[in-house]
Image: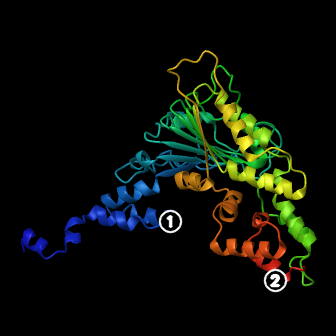
Amino acid sequence: MKASEHGQGMSAAAQVATTPDILDQILSHPFGNRDLTSFLRVSPLFFHMAGRKLYSTLPISNALNTVSLSGSSGGSSGSGSYGREQLLPYVRTVLVERAPIPKRPIWAGWEELPPLPFVENVIIQPADASARQQGGQDTSLPSNALIERLCPSATRLHLATRRYIRGAKSMQPIPSLPNVNTLVLKVRAPDIHSVRRVLGDSDESSPPCPNIRQVHLLLWGDVVYPSKAFRRIPWPSKTGVSRRALMDLTEASYGPLTSRPHADLCAAVKHLGDREHVKVLHLYNVESVLKRDVEWADSMGYGDQRTVEDTLREMKEAFCRETEGAGDGDEVSVVSFNPATTFYDTFGLYGGDKQEAWYTSAVIKPSARLTALRQQLADRTGEPADHFLGLKEHDVQTVLDYYKE
């Protein structure tokens, strides 16, 4: 049969679709890395299409070398038409994970590695809250020299607090990546005072990443899961959940904000504005955090006259202060306040922080059922529904089942 005759019997969709189109549809499903790896040796087409997805994000750490073409035995594991070197150009994001330094070094000879040519993002994983180190500088991250060697083309750097593990006396400075023009910063509410330490001193003669022009800052962690409070009270109590026990839970949920973040937020924003080239600041979830703080403080009887609008205005002024002698042609500073959902819609949930994942599901994007249960509890107790943001579905349901008026 001639090709034209064969084509006449095909549907319009089948004629339009090509093999790469079909494979692209197949590989668009959420396969795990093990499944994608099994596709690599099926054919050259499978190799490159699966490899593009498998290697779009590349993790590295003190204990994980995914770049070198030599295996631990010294034999080649990356050369040839199906070798790893064919896949490294697909890397767009390097995820720098934390791990103890192994007894046997795995990055020997890293100085000879070629740069990853098309890296756009470098993500530095936050420190694990449970990790410990006995003094000295935090050693849980690979050296900055390695990151700078692999990622000179990166244009976006992602940082997050906690920046160093407990017990360490100092943190590793951020890597100096000259092409980075965008900083994405995720800051826990209790850590807002440490933004200066995260970035380093702005009046250094040669600060790292000197060409950052815009910053995206997400503030989160103002509400926590009250696990310690649950251990202090009988839970669930067959004799009923008292109002005092419920208030203990809500107070523990809002614990991170007892220090009032207004001054620290303004100081952090001012520090960002002090960097010479930073002209654009996008803030996420800040307004919501401040509103919750004011409402909680008022309900507890220690509110002041400061409004959310006052703080937002002060933050904007701290960043957009007039520079003496500025000319008409100078770039105007811009500050925007955005909901947290905009941040996650733009950048996604990344980094593997379990507390952030919980916060997102409990505070930022709660399920419809959880929202409804919180409202039921609010109606029953007369407390605002936001007071129960720290409680999970089964917690709220338990309170509803056992609450004593």
Say if 390 sits above or below 206 in the image: below
Is 321 or 3 nearer to us in this picture? 321
Q: Amino acid at mark 1?
A: Gly
Q: Residue at x 13, y 77 (%)?
A: 9
Say if 393 sits above or below 44 in the image: below
Considering the numbered disc 1 on the image, is that residue within a helix, a strand or a loop? loop
Q: Amino acid at mark 2?
A: Asp
Where does the image place residue 338, in percent across and percent down from the top left?
Answer: 60, 49
Give the labeled residue for mark 2: 401
Say if 91 sits above or below 173 in the image: below
In this picture, residue 27 sits left or right of residue 236:
left
Q: Residue at x 54, y 33 (%)?
A: 111
Q: Residue at x 82, y 64 (%)?
A: 226
Give the labeled residue for mark 1: 32
Where does the image place residue 119, in percent across and percent down from the top left?
Answer: 47, 42
Where does the image place residue 324, in percent across and percent down from the top left?
Answer: 64, 17
Residue 356: which disc?
Answer: none
Does label 1 or label 2 sit earlier along the sequence? 1
Where does the image place residue 125, in percent across and percent down from the top left?
Answer: 64, 48
- The C terminus - image quarter: bottom right
Task: Using the rendered image of the protein, determine whether residue 198 is visible from the camera's viewpoint.
Answer: no
| Quadrant of res 202 | top right
| Quadrant of res 105 | top right
